[in-house]
Image (tube, coloured by chain):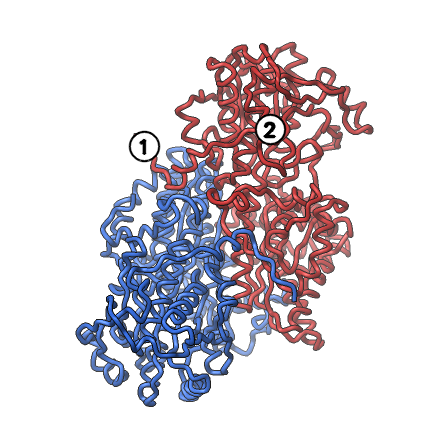
Chain colours: A red, B blue
């Protein structure tokens, strides 16, 4: 096979050398482990978590310092798996693992499990050598070993995973993933201990959504790159808005469970409207209230002759609106047990012709209206027709509404237009409203990692190798002090059990790492509150431009404004 | 008012010094004009164009060379106007004009007409001084003086424009725009000559679509930046596709009249499917044939276990499909004279509730079906319901279908899904088809201009100033040899009349600069033909990454692959 072509930039990025924290630069054989006091999870979950994690609960936090370490010189085989959605820097985690292992002992081996945890269950393995890794350094994507969403959950899956690890003589497994995947890592670590196996399991915090964070994990990798890409696009659009001065642009940004992405992109672009799902939920806002909040800003701007603007909203907005969540849940209940009279178009809406769908729709519409309680029936009737149709037609194999496919930005635009039409009739609005909508998500998951993410992921991987070489299990790779230069970053490990909560899922008690939502008492959100009124009316759009890999550190190496605020530095 | 905040990158970009072609570096007072032979337009239009442009037809092409030039030292006032959609580099055209004027004579003045040609009609003017221009160098957008789509067409408008130019003592007007705007520039130049006014008019070729080009205009500005931004996004998505390996992504790219953008982005990303509107038109492909062409590649890839891929299509695809163009035209005729029975939802579809729309829709659907000829009625029935509904409901104030709002990528996806379902039934397809769609347009119009566009627009502006200082009217600023370093670029002017064709528009003969469509006999399209079969099945996605402004020239200064092919260099 001919050698794959690569882009000019990729050729250059392959040569980038991430900067390691000073401690890691010593190499595992010269790093000693300093154990802190035993740790615990949140008090109210302690009893339950302790029971579930009899072998791994209460481990000490560990830090690294300079010091001879012979244990770290032993030969090991380490397996790595990527779990869940793509995030920029996954390949550098693997490169960091590789370099960390090889520096400690050139005989150490690195195996990649293919296509996510399914690759562990099915024993699909790729040996990662220097030739392969050198083709992937500082690149985006997960294509080196690919990823998957399978979790290791059933006793049979745990058994199969164990057999794969034994068959491949794996001494340590590194799981790169989000909250769910790291919860899974904790469970595997506990299971292997239970089985008296000396195989350690280490997690690495990944997710562009930024919702895997706490006092020990300052940010998950991929968030910096993704938000920089979205901010590039939103900033370009802001400049277009300010040039054309006749359109409102509504941008929905990836991030279903938390609004961190929207918040960060807002700091980087200073839009006229920002919706934060967590605030909408806390204030128990209705859909109409959300629409009115936006309409109010739009009509006030129009009164100043500004019939244009920029609005940002999080992908998950609709589920943060309590009544919408209720409606979706009611529709799921109503439609998951199909009534006999419905035609077959549901199963393949794409193949349906206009007449069929309309007949099916009207039928279904009437059925649903007759069954919903009054408040939800009114809400459903208030929705624009295409959205109502989507709620009825687009459903997953279990009959559930495909929430992620609801184009909330279009829903809002139609409802705002309707509201403005009412205001116009009442002579309370005399402007124009022309809108353009966007959704940005996939564009930001696989870009070349920013220098920050390239450095951070390389350090996370290298650090995970050091944890593994010290035979520490049930830890998450922790690299902190990220507001500083990489040299000054602080490395170590945090017990996964420390981050666990107990939640009821599908009727049973499960240990989970809780998603970190936007903290309404946190500094970033408070900064937004202080700024957004000014942004709404005194246009001051920022155009951050494309990620730069070369040039002054002021543009290549800075990380997120969210982190800057959290560190108490006003983003400038 | 507080000083506007700007991004870190913008601070740096303001300091970038574009590199001028060697000739222009001399300054207007040291550049002499070399006139060539008289020019002519295409033979078959000559009689008509000569009649319409009695005072400006047949001007010689001009080149610049080193030489004393006292004429260029006289004091002039130059007015500039931005016309049509945004394109990266507009501000640098103005900066180039400014610097070119000031170097020739510090007393020269530059005026900007606001909001496009309407600013000339209405005498809305902004004086551009060094303080203002220094805030806009190398930035994207048109916000310095904004743009507009008004054309100067009626006798009253010409009169008003003339009065504005006289009132502001303008010696030269520079019109920055696409084919229509440059046609308008030619008309204004002719009108002012007719009126015995010594005010010259110069055009500058702008459009991200890349469809204003010919042997004298190698590319229009903004095309390089826009295609680099779209390629960044498409490349990131390609890497995501290759990592997730379970989705087909369909990306529609801006460019309604021509498919240059799609072609260029294809060279930069190497997708599995590329649709070129001009080819679809030349082959008179039906919608079903387009769908089958795509379905064929999708099902062949599925047979190899690849249920994923990347498809690019141009915004204007639907109008390139002859039968769709016919259908849209028939619908425009049918619906622009509304029959009395229709409800009022048309005028405000956003405000309509589900039931109303459905009733209106069914009514309208039946009416249209009864009126269309058989072939179009069949075609209409074959469309997915949401698209059919859109064709009936979303119309402009004249009752015309809003073609630009048809989400062709979604139309194709639904029809492909339906076709694959048929194939599955016939046991000819055994794969999966999950799709995600995108439209990229506005993201690419106002980005920071690439180094190429920053240099090119600055040279175009500087060059236009030299033309104006030499009192040349009816020319377009021409900067050629763009494949080479800016120093080696060749500068001069081309008579606008030389580019004119005669077309029948709205029943009368009009002089127009014809849009340059993708040439099916040209080197870029032939290169695509040679490559696309390989791209379809042997995935070799390129990830070009974000535009870089710093670092090696191999990534910061290269221009489009289209230009490289046109110059006979295989894009590497």
- Chain letter of disc 2 in the image: A
- Quadrant showing the N terminus of chain B: bottom right
Can you give x and y, in whole percent of width and height, for residue A207 in the image? 59, 37
For the image shown, how many numbered marks are present on the structure?
A: 2
Q: Nearer the viewer, residue B51 or A54?
A: B51
Q: Residues within 10 Å of mark 2 (few under 14, many from 20)?
A: many
- Chain letter of disc 1 in the image: A
Above or below A174: residue A87: below
Quarter of image, res B572: top left
Residue at 61% from the left image edge and 15% from the top image edge: A67
Above or below A154: residue A261: below
Quarter of image, res B181: bottom left
Q: Secondary structure at mark 2?
A: strand
Q: Which residue is mark 2?
A: A204
Can you give x and y, in whole percent of width and height, for residue A318 in the image? 67, 51
Q: CA distance from mark 1 to mark 2?
A: 32 Å
* Mark positioned earlier in the residue sequence (1 or 2): 1
Can you give x and y, in whole percent of width and height, for residue A268 in the image? 60, 51
Above or below B123: residue A304: above
Q: Does residue A420 appear in this view?
A: yes
Q: Secondary structure at mark 1?
A: loop
Quarter of image, res A151: top right
Q: Residues within 10 Å of mark 1 (few under 14, many from 20)?
A: few
B88 sits left or right of A154 in the view: left
Q: Which residue is mark 1?
A: A3
B76 sits left or right of A119 in the view: left
Above or below B66: residue A232: above
Can you give x and y, in whole percent of width and height, for residue A7 in the image? 37, 41
């Amino acid at each position: 096979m001919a050698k794959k072509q690569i882009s000019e930039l990729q050729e250059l990025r392959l040569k980038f050398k991430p900067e390691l924290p000073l401690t890691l630069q010593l190499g595992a054989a010269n790093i000693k482990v300093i154990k802190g006091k035993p740790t615990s999870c949140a008090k109210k979950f302690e009893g339950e978590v302790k029971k579930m994690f009899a072998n791994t609960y209460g481990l000490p936090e560990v830090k690294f310092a300079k010091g001879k370490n012979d244990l770290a010189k032993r030969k090991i085989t380490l397996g790595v798996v990527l779990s869940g959605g793509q995030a920029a820097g996954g390949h550098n985690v693997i490169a960091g693992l590789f370099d960390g292992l090889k520096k400690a002992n050139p005989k150490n081996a690195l195996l990649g499990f293919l296509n996510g945890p399914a690759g562990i269950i099915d024993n699909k393995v790729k040996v990662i050598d220097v030739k392969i890794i050198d083709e992937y350094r500082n690149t985006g994507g997960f294509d080196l070993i690919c990823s998957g969403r399978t979790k290791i959950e059933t006793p049979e899956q745990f058994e199969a995973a164990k057999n794969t690890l034994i068959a491949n003589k794996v001494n340590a497994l590194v799981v790169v993933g989000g909250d769910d995947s790291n919860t899974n890592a904790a469970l595997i670590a506990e299971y292997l201990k239970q089985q008296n196996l000396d195989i350690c399991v280490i997690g690495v915090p990944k997710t562009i959504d930024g919702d895997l964070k706490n006092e020990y994990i300052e940010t998950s990798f991929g968030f910096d790159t993704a938000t920089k890409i979205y901010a590039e696009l939103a900033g370009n659009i802001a400049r277009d808005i300010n040039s054309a001065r006749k359109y409102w642009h509504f941008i929905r940004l990836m991030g279903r469970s938390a609004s961190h992405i929207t918040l960060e992109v807002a700091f980087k672009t200073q839009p006229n409207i920002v919706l934060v799902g967590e605030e909408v939920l806390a204030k128990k806002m209705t859909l109409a209230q959300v629409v009115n909040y936006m309409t109010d800003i739009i009509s006030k701007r129009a009164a100043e002759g500004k019939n244009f603007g920029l609005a940002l909203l999080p992908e998950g907005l609709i589920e943060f609106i309590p009544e919408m969540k209720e409606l979706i849940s009611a529709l799921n209940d109503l439609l998951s047990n199909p009534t006999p009279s419905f035609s077959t178009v549901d199963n393949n809406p794409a193949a349906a012709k206009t007449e069929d769908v309309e007949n099916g729709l009207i039928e279904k519409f009437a059925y649903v209206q007759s069954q919903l309680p009054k408040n939800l029936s009114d809400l459903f009737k208030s929705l624009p027709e295409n959205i109502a149709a989507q709620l009825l037609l687009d459903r997953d194999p279990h009959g559930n509404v495909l929430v992620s496919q609801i184009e909330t930005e279009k829903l809002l635009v139609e409802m705002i237009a309707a509201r403005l039409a009412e205001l116009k009739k009442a002579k309370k609005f005399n402007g124009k409203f022309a809108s353009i909508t966007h959704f940005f998500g996939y564009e930001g998951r696989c870009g070349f990692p920013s220098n920050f993410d390239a450095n951070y992921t390389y350090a996370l991987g290298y650090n995970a190798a050091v944890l593994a070489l010290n035979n520490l299990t049930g830890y998450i790779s922790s690299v902190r002090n990220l507001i500083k230069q990489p040299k000054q970053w602080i490395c170590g490990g945090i017990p996964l059990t420390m981050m666990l909560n107990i939640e009821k899922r599908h009727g049973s008690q499960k240990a989970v790492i809780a998603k970190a939502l936007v903290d309404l008492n946190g500094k970033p959100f408070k900064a937004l509150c202080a700024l957004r009124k000014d942004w709404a009316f005194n246009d001051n759009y920022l155009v951050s431009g494309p990620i730069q890999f070369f040039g002054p550190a002021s543009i290549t190496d800075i990380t997120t404004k969210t982190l800057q605020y959290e560190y108490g530095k006003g983003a400038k």
